[in-house]
Amino acid sequence: MPLSFAWIWKKVKEKLTRSGRSQTRKSNAGADEAQAAAQVDIAASSAPSRRASTIWTLDSPSADWTPNQSDEHQVDIPFGFLANIRPANALVTTTDLNDLLPVEILSAIFELAAQAHHNVPAVVMFVSKYWRTVALTHKPLWSYLWLDYRSPKEKYLRWNERLGGLNMPRSITIVALAREQTLTEDWRYLEKELQSLERGHTIKSFNFYGNFETFDWCVSKMRLDTFEEINLQVDWWPWDGRKPPSPHGPFGILDGYWPQSVNAKPIRTISLSHLGISFRSLDLSELTTLEIFDADQLTFPEPSIIMPALKTMPRLETLVLEYTGLYGTSHKYNEYGIIRLAHLRQLQINGGWPKFYFLGALELPNLESLAVDSASEVVFRILSKFGAPLRRICCASYRVVDPNILLEQLGAYPSLTSVYLLDSADSTIATRFAARRMADPGFLPLLKCFESCNELSWTDCLSPPLDSTDVAAIPAKYCRWQDAHWREVMEIMFALVMQRTTLPLTRTSSMFSAEWKTEIKSRYKPRQRSSK
């Protein structure tokens, strides 16, 4: 999970980069690293190479604008080099965890980090020779490309050179926080390249982060119907302070921009933030993931939109509906009959909308993960109707259910392995659970994690208290997220339950900080006209 990988990454980096590591490391491990590095150097020397600094190529988008350019040095990999490396020849197997992490674990960490940060491959290349070897031989690590205001064309060309003719799913992320950014010659080139179906490689995942103005450019210039996975996040407010347009206009309903071409592919993943969608013109027969985050009263799908759409999603496995509007909704979902989602395994519903009525209108025979806020007895009563094989559950604001009733409800799901109760006001849940386990050792036999926490404390309910009758003896400690925002805590726990390897791509709100926007905007300054 994200926190675990971050901890491992930090510890390994400290170990491999500490001073004097070559003297203190075991001799056999040092020989292995030297051998791996030598093999990489030989492979690199046999291929044509060139090294030069990359200069931002932001061309003037108009007569009145010109970018403030700077230089940026990047790692230069010879053309086709990744395609020519054989892992069996380049990697030296190691099982000494006190010295180096195994290749498989380190490769998984690298790839997860590359999905969340645009410069991971270049960074790990300089940590150690062993990391450099692992990074070069794990080809999927290089399939993720981030394009922003810094030399997008140059990055795209180098990306193609590094991968060569490798046939693997590729992912592109575009960060466009200034309208002027999309008017440069670099971006005009990328428009043509991404629209072309003869580019020689397939882009599986397309991710976009921007504001309302750059979003208009994205959906009008990119062939969204040629990507299997779509992740779109739009910042709430443009720089000029104007409010977002109505969803009934050209912005809010995403279908209005969705292209209709003969080369369209069935979409498999839709992840949106601050966007509305009506599903009218989409082929949803292959859709497996639908995520709608940060929807308000204007962009949250009404029952007349979402319920008919769900009937056309026979393969749906993951569903997220998050309402963050200031005012609650009073939608009715019982007018569309019971909708059976036989393949749905992960469900997240939160916010001030009638989610229990929505849940009651669904039949979920194979649901394994449930993340819900403001939970009550209604949730378990609804799920018990079709005997869902729940394995993981997270309930936030769990304040209204008696602990004994809660344990009875959980006991109806013997397959449970993880239970998280957030903002739980009852401090006796651990004691009650221990007493129940003592009376019935077979109660929830597969349970591996049972945690209850609030703003002040965290309790591991699987660790029995010293005295089952002494509430004060519950082994509680200060909450590990005591200084974090409660919403962030809920997002992390929901990610655990929803079996996400990383936080959703549409939750990287740090990209839209005021300081970062100011920095981007400062690179586009009015050109000083010469007075003659």
Image (cartoon, rainbow, N blue to C red):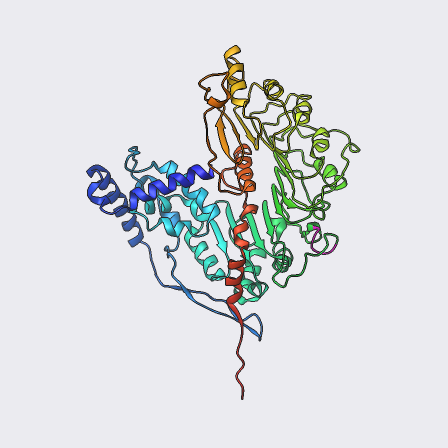
Residue 38 in percent (x, y) is at 25, 47
User: Going by the image, does 478 lie left or right of 235?
Assistant: left
Nearest the eye: 88 or 356: 356
User: Going by the image, does 35 lie left or right of 289?
Assistant: left
> In this picture, is 190 found above or below 355?
below
Residue 64 in percent (x, y) is at 57, 75
Locate residue 196: give its quadrant.
bottom right
Residue 250 in magenta stretch: yes
> In this picture, is 89 found above or below 200?
above
> What residue is drawn where x is 35% and y is 40%?
11
User: Going by the image, does 343 lie left or right of 466?
Assistant: right
Residue 216 in percent (x, y) is at 64, 58
Residue 309 in magenta stretch: no
Nearest the eye: 249 or 351: 351
> What residue is drawn where x is 54% and y is 15%?
436
- State the extent of the magenta-drawn residues as a range: 249-253
> In this picture, is 437 found above or below 516?
above
- Residue 167 seen in the figure: no
> What residue is drawn where x is 69% and y is 55%?
251
User: Going by the image, does 257 lie left or right of 396?
Assistant: right
Q: Is the magenta stretch mostly helix, strand or loop?
A: loop
Query: Residue reaching furthest right?
Result: 335
